Image (tube, rainbow, N blue to C red):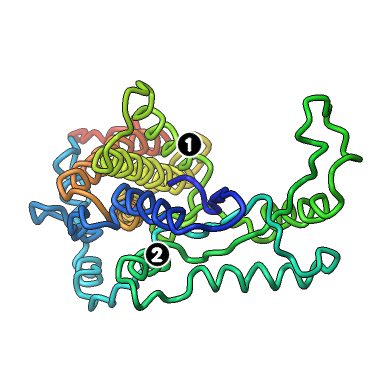
């Protein structure tokens, strides 16, 4: 759930039960991120409309105490509701899994690195070869293929019997040269160009977002009494995803508004222009939220969306007052004096 590059450590060779265990836990993970049979079909609200049919701007209007901005007709005409739906692309839920086979003994020539790399690919292909004669074995392989974007393997030789002795104190000189050569190659393979950012729903996860997911999952395992059910993990994933969508959407609105009316702004913006900026920034922020919070229970997504709209309304009031404090005509009054 948290890694873009998963390593499955097995002993001597990839056995059938290794594939079955991988298929089982990957299905658990699929359900936990809303890609398995337990996923509830959800159509996220359009970026300018809530579940009660009101626009995001009108929802903000209800939260504002003063005369709020209205949704422009041309903006409503340009709403994504009028665009034809694009066909959904089938995305695999996880990125890469690699079988790390320990104590491999079947290299033709352990002096030829290129040949050993070729043998790794050939061995994996033989393991994942279609098993048309056995339905359950074939389904296991198909499930793994549908779950991971890439499946690979790496065959490590034994480090040598000297390292298994009690008196071994960590001297590298006593480790088998072939093992060291393969280890060096593997470190570059894992931490080099092959290491890609973690993606969820085909979108790269930032460090702050990853922290939210880690916190949500850690709470589920805090008791240690039992392994949480997949449905519970799904709830935690949805909650973390919604929280990330809320934070990013609000941050986007604040960054944009800070430029025209934040504490460091120096110019007064006329109300008409100010409200126009507000509408555009709010629409972009809500749209960003909707694009991120795109799976899970519709009620939870809508609640998260309303939270974004409500917080934007609060920030709108603050920015409006900051902007008004820069009005050069503030405090001046016009008096009619009879002659």
**Image-based side of 60 in relation to 276, left or right:** left
Image depth: mark 1 or mark 2 in front: 2
Could you say which disc has been placed on residue 101 in the image?
Answer: none
- Residue in the picture at 21% in, 33% down: 337
Above/below status of 135 relative to 269: below
Q: Quadrant of residue 236?
A: top left
- Residue in the picture at 42% in, 31% down: 215
Whole-percent x and y of residue 38?
20, 53
Above/below status of 142 relative to 323: below
How many dots with numbers?
A: 2
Q: Crowding near pointer 2: few (<14 within 10 Å), some, many (20+)?
A: some
- Residue in the picture at 65% in, 59% down: 154
Of callouts 1 and 2, which one flags the residue occurring earlier in the amino acid sequence?
2
**Image-based side of 175 in relation to 231, left or right:** right
On-image quarter of the C terminus = top left
Q: 317 or 118: which is nearer to us?
A: 118
Q: 218 or 326: which is nearer to us?
A: 218
Whole-percent x and y of residue 51?
11, 53
For numbered disc 1, what is the local secondary structure?
helix
Could you say which disc has been placed on residue 92 in the image?
Answer: 2
For numbered disc 2, what is the local secondary structure?
loop
Whole-percent x and y of residue 16?
44, 59
| Residue wearing tag 1 | 211
| Residue 282 visible to an observer of this rendering | no
Q: Crowding near pointer 1: few (<14 within 10 Å), some, many (20+)?
A: some
């Amino acid at each position: 759930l948290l890694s873009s590059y998963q390593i499955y450590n097995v002993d001597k060779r990839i056995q059938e039960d290794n594939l079955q265990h991988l298929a089982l836990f990957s299905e658990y993970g699929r359900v936990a991120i809303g890609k398995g049979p337990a996923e509830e079909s959800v159509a996220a609200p359009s970026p300018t409309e809530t579940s009660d049919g009101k626009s995001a701007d009108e929802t903000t209007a209800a939260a504002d105490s003063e005369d709020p901005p209205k949704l422009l007709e041309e903006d409503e005409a340009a709403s994504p509701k009028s665009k034809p739906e694009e066909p959904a692309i089938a995305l695999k839920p996880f990125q890469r899994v690699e079988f790390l086979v320990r104590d491999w003994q079947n290299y033709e020539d352990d002096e030829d690195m290129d040949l050993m790399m070729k043998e790794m690919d050939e061995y994996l292909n033989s393991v994942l070869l279609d098993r048309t004669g056995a339905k359950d074995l074939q389904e296991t392989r198909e499930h793994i293929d549908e779950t991971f974007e890439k499946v690979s393997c790496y065959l490590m030789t034994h480090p040598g019997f000297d390292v298994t002795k009690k008196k071994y104190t960590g001297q590298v000189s006593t480790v088998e040269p072939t093992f060291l050569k393969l280890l060096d190659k593997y470190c570059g393979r894992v931490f080099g160009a092959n290491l890609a950012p973690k993606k969820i729903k085909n979108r790269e996860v930032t460090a702050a977002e990853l922290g939210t997911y880690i916190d949500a999952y850690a709470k589920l395992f805090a008791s240690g009494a039992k392994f949480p059910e997949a449905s519970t993990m799904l709830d935690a994933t949805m909650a973390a995803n919604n929280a990330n969508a809320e934070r990013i959407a609000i941050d986007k609105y604040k960054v944009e508004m800070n430029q025209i009316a934040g504490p460091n702004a120096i110019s007064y913006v006329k109300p008409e222009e100010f409200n126009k900026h507000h509408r555009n920034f709010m629409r972009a922020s809500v749209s960003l939220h909707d694009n991120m919070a795109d799976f899970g229970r519709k009620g939870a997504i809508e609640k998260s969306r309303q939270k974004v709209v409500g917080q934007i309304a609060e920030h709108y009031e603050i920015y409006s007052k900051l902007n008004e404090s820069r009005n050069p005509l503030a405090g001046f009054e016009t008096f009619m004096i009879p002659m």
